[in-house]
Image (cartoon, rainbow, N blue to C red):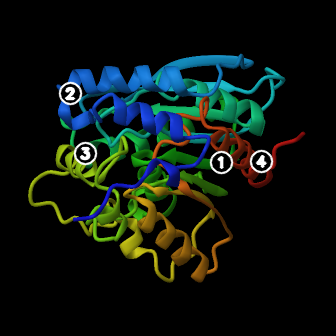
Amino acid sequence: MRQRIALDLVAADAVDLVRAFRDNGEVSFKDVPLADARANYLKVCSANGVAWEAVAEVSTLAYPVIQGNAALRLYRPAGSAADTLTPWVLFIHGGGWVIGNLDSHDSLCRSLANQSGASVVAVDYRLAPEHPFPAPLDDCRAALQFVRDNASALRLDLDNAVVAGDSAGGNMATVLANHPAYQVEGIAFKAQVLFYPVTDLTASHGSYQRITDGFSLTAKSMYWFREQYVPAGQNLSDARLSPLLHAEGRTQPDLFILTAGHDPLADEGIAYAAAAARAGTAVVHHHLPRHAHGVMTNAGRIESGRRLLAEAAGFIADRAKVSR
């Protein structure tokens, strides 16, 4: 039996959050009713996220999906002229395809817009298990089509687009950037920004064996998220679920990727960065060996998260040709 990771092996700027989680009984998303898991995630993101910032403009819009509508939220960065086209980021929130919404990542998107100088389009896709794979992914593609068809009214420069996401959102972001079936004519992403993404849902990497308790995301909670999202009998090696298994030899849009050592997703994220680099992709990879999953949604309490959010914003500004 593996021994749990001791607190003295956790980064100094994150140890208080990990200690509090352990002292409060290590209640995971899978341990409470789904409605409570979703509400608790919103509370945690609100309490621990980066400080709220004013932006030049915010608008929430409905976009069509199969059997109804979903929503997206557009943030124009502070200081942007109202009548000009801006570079933009399609941001897809994390939460295991099961929890999270526009509000869980609101402060993060505001900060990303202001620091990068690009507009941010956050996608509120429908969630599993009510809407299992591939519905959330298809919703993200539908949002991209909506942006393409309404770019002039939204004042977005289609020639300067970046896709970004954290965790499950990072999974869908890189699928949109690379999978032929999810390309949208008229939009070619200049880059992708992935914060501790899911890249291999077969869960075959060693970090699944190392991170089994003591953190808010463990192997067991990832198995639960996978069970909610993926229908029984679905091939987990599908490129839409496990893009790492199809990454070798494929040049991708420029890649910014963050991985964390105390995260069951650590090894697959590291492998994804390496495969992209071997194929000739320009890769910026930041690894935090003593941090856990959720650095960005806890960046109000974790200084390393704030620093890397600024790094990601600079990467976006460079790739999307933001005028400073």
Q: Residue type at mark 2: give it.
A: Leu
Residue 41 seen in render: yes
How far, Cα to Cα, is label 4 from label 2? 37 Å
Using residue 270 as the reference point, say whether residue 160 is left or right of it. Answer: right
Q: Position of residue 61 (x, y in %)?
A: 49, 20
Q: Secondary structure at mark 4?
A: helix
Q: Is 86 placed above or below 178 here? A: above
Q: Position of residue 289 (x, y in %)?
A: 55, 60
Q: Secondary structure at mark 3?
A: helix
Q: Residue type at mark 4: give it.
A: Gly
User: Upstream in the sequence, badge 4 or badge 3?
Assistant: 3
> In percent of the image, x 72 and y 49: which residue is there?
316
Residue at which label 1 appears? 161
> In percent of the image, x 43 and y 63: which residue is there?
179
User: Upstream in the sequence, badge 4 or badge 2?
Assistant: 2
Task: For marks 4 and 2, give the one nearer the viewer.
Answer: 2
Residue at which label 2 appears? 34
Label disc, if present, on residue 314 of the rendered structure: 4
> In percent of the image, x 81 and y 49: which residue is there?
321
Crowding around mark 1 (Cα neighbors within 10 Å: few <14, some 14 to 19, many 20+) is many
Residues marked 3 and 2 touching at CB (< 8 Å) = no
User: Upstream in the sequence, badge 1 or badge 4?
Assistant: 1
